Image (tube, rainbow, N blue to C red):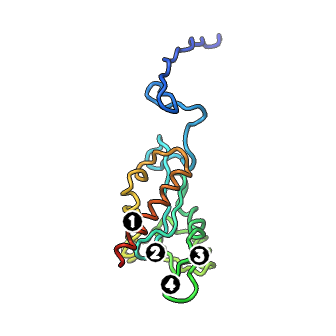
Amino acid sequence: MAPPARRPAQRVAPCRSVGPGRLCRGRLARPGVERGDHVGASPVDRARPGSKHHLIVDRHGTPLAVTLTGGNRHDVTQLLPLLDTVPPIRGLRGRPRRRPRRLYADRDYDFDKYRRLLWKRGIKPMIARRGVAHGSGLGKVRWVVERAFAWLHQFKRLRIRYERRADIHQGLLELACSLICLRRLRTSF
Protein backbone atom coordinates (compact mmCIF):
# COMPACT_ATOMS: atom_id res chain seq x y z
CA MET A 1 0.00 0.00 0.00
CA ALA A 2 1.17 3.50 -0.73
CA PRO A 3 1.58 5.95 2.12
CA PRO A 4 -1.27 8.43 2.47
CA ALA A 5 -0.89 11.58 0.43
CA ARG A 6 0.18 14.63 2.41
CA ARG A 7 -1.98 17.68 2.25
CA PRO A 8 -0.33 20.92 1.26
CA ALA A 9 0.38 23.27 4.15
CA GLN A 10 -2.47 25.68 4.71
CA ARG A 11 -1.66 29.33 4.74
CA VAL A 12 -2.60 31.08 7.98
CA ALA A 13 -4.05 34.54 7.68
CA PRO A 14 -1.66 37.21 8.94
CA CYS A 15 -2.23 38.35 12.50
CA ARG A 16 -2.88 41.94 13.34
CA SER A 17 -1.26 43.31 16.44
CA VAL A 18 -3.57 43.87 19.41
CA GLY A 19 -2.05 44.79 22.76
CA PRO A 20 0.61 42.52 24.22
CA GLY A 21 -0.55 39.47 22.26
CA ARG A 22 -1.73 38.90 18.72
CA LEU A 23 -5.27 38.21 17.65
CA CYS A 24 -5.36 35.30 15.17
CA ARG A 25 -8.67 34.02 13.88
CA GLY A 26 -10.56 35.17 16.96
CA ARG A 27 -8.14 33.70 19.52
CA LEU A 28 -5.49 35.44 21.53
CA ALA A 29 -2.18 33.90 20.52
CA ARG A 30 0.76 34.36 22.84
CA PRO A 31 3.92 32.36 22.47
CA GLY A 32 4.19 29.65 25.10
CA VAL A 33 0.92 30.38 26.93
CA GLU A 34 -1.83 27.81 26.61
CA ARG A 35 -3.57 27.46 29.97
CA GLY A 36 -3.01 28.87 33.40
CA ASP A 37 -1.84 27.16 36.57
CA HIS A 38 -4.24 25.25 38.81
CA VAL A 39 -6.48 24.51 35.85
CA GLY A 40 -7.72 21.02 35.15
CA ALA A 41 -10.54 19.41 33.27
CA SER A 42 -13.85 20.65 34.57
CA PRO A 43 -15.94 17.89 36.16
CA VAL A 44 -19.09 19.54 34.78
CA ASP A 45 -18.02 20.41 31.24
CA ARG A 46 -15.17 18.10 30.29
CA ALA A 47 -14.27 20.08 27.19
CA ARG A 48 -13.24 23.15 29.19
CA PRO A 49 -10.63 23.62 31.87
CA GLY A 50 -11.79 24.82 35.27
CA SER A 51 -10.68 25.59 38.79
CA LYS A 52 -12.18 25.18 42.27
CA HIS A 53 -12.27 27.45 45.28
CA HIS A 54 -11.89 25.71 48.64
CA LEU A 55 -13.06 27.71 51.64
CA ILE A 56 -13.12 27.29 55.40
CA VAL A 57 -15.31 29.63 57.46
CA ASP A 58 -16.21 30.18 61.10
CA ARG A 59 -19.73 29.62 62.41
CA HIS A 60 -20.85 33.07 61.22
CA GLY A 61 -19.57 32.64 57.66
CA THR A 62 -16.44 34.77 57.97
CA PRO A 63 -13.76 33.31 55.66
CA LEU A 64 -10.71 32.00 57.53
CA ALA A 65 -8.74 30.39 54.69
CA VAL A 66 -9.14 29.91 50.96
CA THR A 67 -7.22 27.90 48.36
CA LEU A 68 -7.40 27.35 44.63
CA THR A 69 -6.98 24.05 42.77
CA GLY A 70 -7.69 22.60 39.35
CA GLY A 71 -11.24 21.55 38.59
CA ASN A 72 -10.32 17.87 38.37
CA ARG A 73 -9.02 17.62 41.96
CA HIS A 74 -11.16 15.97 44.62
CA ASP A 75 -12.28 18.25 47.45
CA VAL A 76 -10.96 16.07 50.25
CA THR A 77 -7.35 16.39 49.04
CA GLN A 78 -7.40 20.03 50.15
CA LEU A 79 -8.86 19.44 53.61
CA LEU A 80 -5.61 19.21 55.58
CA PRO A 81 -3.69 21.92 53.65
CA LEU A 82 -6.67 24.22 54.15
CA LEU A 83 -6.74 23.53 57.89
CA ASP A 84 -3.00 24.27 58.06
CA THR A 85 -3.54 27.75 56.61
CA VAL A 86 -6.11 28.83 59.21
CA PRO A 87 -4.59 31.73 61.17
CA PRO A 88 -4.69 31.82 64.99
CA ILE A 89 -8.00 33.30 66.15
CA ARG A 90 -8.17 35.16 69.42
CA GLY A 91 -11.22 34.62 71.57
CA LEU A 92 -12.39 36.50 74.63
CA ARG A 93 -9.53 35.28 76.80
CA GLY A 94 -6.67 32.82 76.71
CA ARG A 95 -4.40 31.66 73.94
CA PRO A 96 -5.55 32.06 70.34
CA ARG A 97 -7.07 28.92 68.82
CA ARG A 98 -5.06 27.42 65.98
CA ARG A 99 -7.68 24.86 64.97
CA PRO A 100 -11.46 24.56 65.17
CA ARG A 101 -13.19 22.37 67.76
CA ARG A 102 -15.53 20.83 65.19
CA LEU A 103 -15.48 20.59 61.40
CA TYR A 104 -18.77 20.40 59.49
CA ALA A 105 -18.55 19.06 55.95
CA ASP A 106 -20.70 17.43 53.30
CA ARG A 107 -20.53 13.92 51.86
CA ASP A 108 -17.55 14.74 49.64
CA TYR A 109 -15.32 14.61 52.73
CA ASP A 110 -16.62 11.26 54.04
CA PHE A 111 -13.42 9.18 54.15
CA ASP A 112 -12.34 7.26 57.25
CA LYS A 113 -8.70 8.19 56.64
CA TYR A 114 -9.47 11.90 56.93
CA ARG A 115 -11.80 11.36 59.88
CA ARG A 116 -8.94 9.68 61.76
CA LEU A 117 -6.53 12.47 60.82
CA LEU A 118 -9.00 15.06 62.10
CA TRP A 119 -9.42 13.18 65.40
CA LYS A 120 -5.60 13.08 65.78
CA ARG A 121 -5.53 16.86 65.41
CA GLY A 122 -8.16 17.23 68.12
CA ILE A 123 -10.95 18.21 65.73
CA LYS A 124 -14.32 16.49 65.96
CA PRO A 125 -15.47 15.64 62.40
CA MET A 126 -19.17 16.33 61.83
CA ILE A 127 -19.29 14.92 58.31
CA ALA A 128 -22.39 13.56 56.60
CA ARG A 129 -22.13 9.85 55.77
CA ARG A 130 -22.46 8.51 52.26
CA GLY A 131 -25.36 6.20 51.61
CA VAL A 132 -27.37 7.57 54.53
CA ALA A 133 -30.62 9.37 53.82
CA HIS A 134 -30.67 13.12 54.17
CA GLY A 135 -32.04 14.58 57.36
CA SER A 136 -29.09 14.17 59.72
CA GLY A 137 -29.46 17.82 60.73
CA LEU A 138 -25.99 18.82 59.52
CA GLY A 139 -27.52 20.94 56.75
CA LYS A 140 -28.70 23.37 59.42
CA VAL A 141 -25.06 24.27 59.99
CA ARG A 142 -23.46 23.74 56.57
CA TRP A 143 -25.59 26.37 54.82
CA VAL A 144 -23.27 29.00 56.30
CA VAL A 145 -20.49 27.79 53.99
CA GLU A 146 -22.79 27.97 50.96
CA ARG A 147 -23.71 31.53 51.91
CA ALA A 148 -20.01 32.39 52.18
CA PHE A 149 -19.47 31.02 48.66
CA ALA A 150 -22.36 33.21 47.47
CA TRP A 151 -20.67 36.24 49.08
CA LEU A 152 -17.38 35.26 47.44
CA HIS A 153 -18.92 34.84 44.00
CA GLN A 154 -20.59 38.24 44.12
CA PHE A 155 -17.21 39.46 42.89
CA LYS A 156 -17.40 39.09 39.12
CA ARG A 157 -13.70 38.33 38.66
CA LEU A 158 -14.10 35.24 40.86
CA ARG A 159 -17.30 33.93 39.31
CA ILE A 160 -15.62 33.37 35.96
CA ARG A 161 -11.88 32.95 35.97
CA TYR A 162 -10.32 35.33 33.47
CA GLU A 163 -6.75 35.20 34.79
CA ARG A 164 -4.34 32.67 33.38
CA ARG A 165 -1.94 32.85 36.30
CA ALA A 166 -2.97 31.12 39.50
CA ASP A 167 -1.12 33.54 41.78
CA ILE A 168 -3.16 36.48 40.47
CA HIS A 169 -6.43 34.59 40.91
CA GLN A 170 -5.36 33.48 44.41
CA GLY A 171 -4.61 37.12 45.24
CA LEU A 172 -8.07 38.16 44.07
CA LEU A 173 -9.58 35.37 46.19
CA GLU A 174 -7.74 36.61 49.27
CA LEU A 175 -8.70 40.22 48.54
CA ALA A 176 -12.36 39.21 48.27
CA CYS A 177 -12.12 37.34 51.59
CA SER A 178 -10.58 40.45 53.18
CA LEU A 179 -13.44 42.59 51.87
CA ILE A 180 -15.99 40.10 53.21
CA CYS A 181 -14.27 40.21 56.62
CA LEU A 182 -14.33 44.02 56.53
CA ARG A 183 -18.05 44.03 55.74
CA ARG A 184 -18.68 41.57 58.58
CA LEU A 185 -16.76 43.85 60.96
CA ARG A 186 -18.79 46.89 59.92
CA THR A 187 -22.09 45.13 60.60
CA SER A 188 -20.96 43.74 63.96
CA PHE A 189 -20.56 47.15 65.64
**Residue 153 percent coordinates (x, y):** 39, 57
Give the number of callouts: 4
Q: As shown in the figure, which amino acid type bears the numbered disc 3?
A: Leu
Q: Element at badge 1?
A: helix
The local crowd at label 2, few if under 14, some if 14 to 19, many if 20 or more residues have their Cα within 10 Å, is some
Q: Element at badge 4?
A: loop
The residue that mark 2 highlights is 58
Distance, label 1 to label 2, CA atoms, is 12 Å
The residue that mark 1 highlights is 146
Which residue is painted at 61% across and 13% down in the image? 4
Which residue is painted at 62% across and 74% down in the image? 117
Query: Which is in the foreground here, disc 1 or disc 4?
Result: 4
The residue that mark 4 highlights is 91
Distance, label 2 to label 4, CA atoms, is 12 Å
**Residue 144 percent coordinates (x, y):** 39, 71
Which residue is painted at 52% across and 81% down in the image? 90
Nearer to me, 110 or 95 = 95
Q: Element at badge 2?
A: loop
Query: Which is in the foreground here, disc 2 or disc 4?
Result: 4
Nearer to me, 101 or 134 = 101
Give the label on residue 118, or none.
Answer: 3
The local crowd at label 3, few if under 14, some if 14 to 19, many if 20 or more residues have their Cα within 10 Å, is some
Among the two numbered marks 1 and 3 on one chain, the one whose residue lies closer to the N terminus: 3
Among the two numbered marks 2 and 4 on one chain, the one whose residue lies closer to the N terminus: 2
Are the residues flagged by discs 2 and 4 in contact, CB closer than 8 Å? Answer: no
Give the quarter of the figure containing the C terminus.
bottom left
Distance, label 3 to label 2, CA atoms, is 17 Å
Are the residues flagged by discs 1 and 3 in contact, CB closer than 8 Å? Answer: no
Q: As shown in the figure, which amino acid type bears the numbered disc 4?
A: Gly
Give the quarter of the figure containing the N terminus.
top right
Are the residues flagged by discs 1 and 2 in contact, CB closer than 8 Å? Answer: no
